Structure formats: structure tokens, C-alpha cells
Image (cartoon, rainbow, N blue to C red):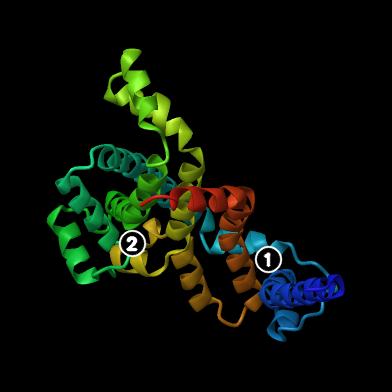
Amino acid sequence: MTKKRKIINKILLGIIAWLISLIVLAPVYLLIINSLKDRTAASLMALTPPEVFHWENYLIVIKEGRLIRSFFNSLLFAGSSAIINIFTASIAAFVLSRRRSKINRAIYYYFLIGLVSPINYITLIRTLQVFHIMGSYQGIIALYAGWLMPFGVFLYYGFIGTIPRELDEAAVLDGCNSFTLFFKVIFPLMKPVTITLLIINFMCAWNDFQTPLYILNRSTKWPMTLAVYNFYGQKLADWQLVSATIVLTVAPVVILFIIGQRYIISGMTSGAVKG
């Protein structure tokens, strides 16, 4: 391939990348500018910026939509489930990876089935009822923690397989027991995978709409996704308020993704080296 042809290909790829970016960013731009317009201008859904910025729209939706309580509910669900998932998945993957018995191999494959198995909500709801955690904070947190458990075990398992066993032996000779070996030697080495799982777990739990709709039967426990849904039903004609509510809902996960995107890429690749 000639040098001129390579330059042309780079230019074409750049144009395609910009076009795809515009397709993705156009709805985001429309959402943001509509959140700052008055009711009449927002109903037109035009791409023109507002003549006057109505920042009070955000104050209105925070007050009328009870978003502060919903924000802390979402933060509790997403943060707690992500921490529990990281703690349990890392320990499970460490044991399964270091003790390669037939039983542990079967357990690992059992976890992998969870990567493709859909959620059966009828069985799930019945299980939560049996343990008397249906509609509770504990139930939804436990559900989210187990939701991405197979994915967490899969990534940790592959990454731990790349850590030399000689490191374990050296730590044991220095007097480390199993817990000290894992938490002080192995776990700090798994930072890329840990941050990746933290971000993915947090984003999945924060953005989920269907599960809390089925599980949580009290509006005081609703996360922001359900608060937006409820507010949308009440303010269907007030698109400026609906847009402001959606912006406030997606802003935390967008910021989190921007901060941790480089860790997501490195964690996904490093955790998929061995299986």
C-alpha cells in the first residue's frame, strides 16, 4: 500500500469516526439544550440553543421529582452491590484458579453459564419472598451483587491465572496465611480488573429500570431511573423538565465512565488473557 493511499484511508476513517460521533452526540446535545429552555421552546425540539438559559429547571425537578432521595437510593444500590460483587467474585476466582480440581473446574463452568442465562423474574421474586427481603434495600442490593457475579469471576479468574504461583509460595514462606496472601499480595495486583468491575457494576445497577420496577413496591425506595419514569408521567408536556431530569440521572455514570474508561479497557484485556 502506497503512502498516499494510507493517508487517504486515515482521512476516510477520521471522517467516519466524526460522523459516528455526531450521530451519538446529537441526542445528548438536544437533551442538554432542551433542559435549559422554557416550556414553549422545549416542545419544538429544535437544535438551536436557548435565547435565555433557564437553570431553574434543574431546581424544579430536584424539588418536585424528589431526586435527592432517589439519588442516594441509586448510590446505595450501585455502590454497595459493586463492593460486595468485587469482594466475593475476587475471592471465589482466587480459590477456583489456584485449586484446579475437577469440582472447582465444574463450579467455574457453572459461573460461566450465568454469563448467558437470562433472569427469571418469577423465580427471583419467589426467592426474595422466601427470604423475606422482597421490596427491601437488602434484596435489591443482593440481587445486583449477584447479577454480574459470573462476569466478575470470569475476569478475575483469567487475571489471576497470569500471576505466577511462585509469588504465592514466597508469601507463604514469609509467614502469610491464606487471607493475608490474598488481601495483601494478590488483590493489590488486580487493580485494573477491580476498577473495571467497579465501574461496570455501578453503571449497570444505576441504569437499570426493569428490576427495581418489579422488586421495589414503595416510591420512597425508588432509584433515579424510576423517579424519572414517574416524573415523566406527571410532566409529559413539560419537556424542559423531563430533559433536565434525564440529564441529572445520566450525569453521574457519564462522569464515572469518563474518569475510568482507560481502566475498563486495560481490565477487560488483562482479565481475558487466560480462561
The image quadrant of residue 45 is: bottom right
Q: In percent of the image, x 44 and y 66: which residue is there? A: 226
Q: Amino acid at mark 2?
A: Arg
> Residue drawn 64% across and 53% down?
258
**Along the line of sight, which residue is nearer the eye, 57 or 121?**
121
Give the Cα distance between marks 1 and 2.
26 Å
Residue type, mark 1 in image: Asn
The residue closer to the viewer here, 85 or 42, is 85
Q: Secondary structure at mark 1?
A: helix
Q: Residue at horizontal 75%, vertical 81%? A: 41
Residue 4 relative to residue 166: left or right: right
Q: Which mark is residue 250?
A: none
**Residue 161, percent across and down?**
37, 42
Does label 1 or label 2 sit earlier along the sequence? 1
From the image, tell me which residue sits under label 2. Answer: 218
Q: Position of residue 153 (x, y in %)?
A: 33, 49
The residue at the far bottom in this view is: 44
Q: Which residue is mark 1?
A: 57
Position of residue 252 measured from the top left corner of the image (x, y, whole percent): 58, 54
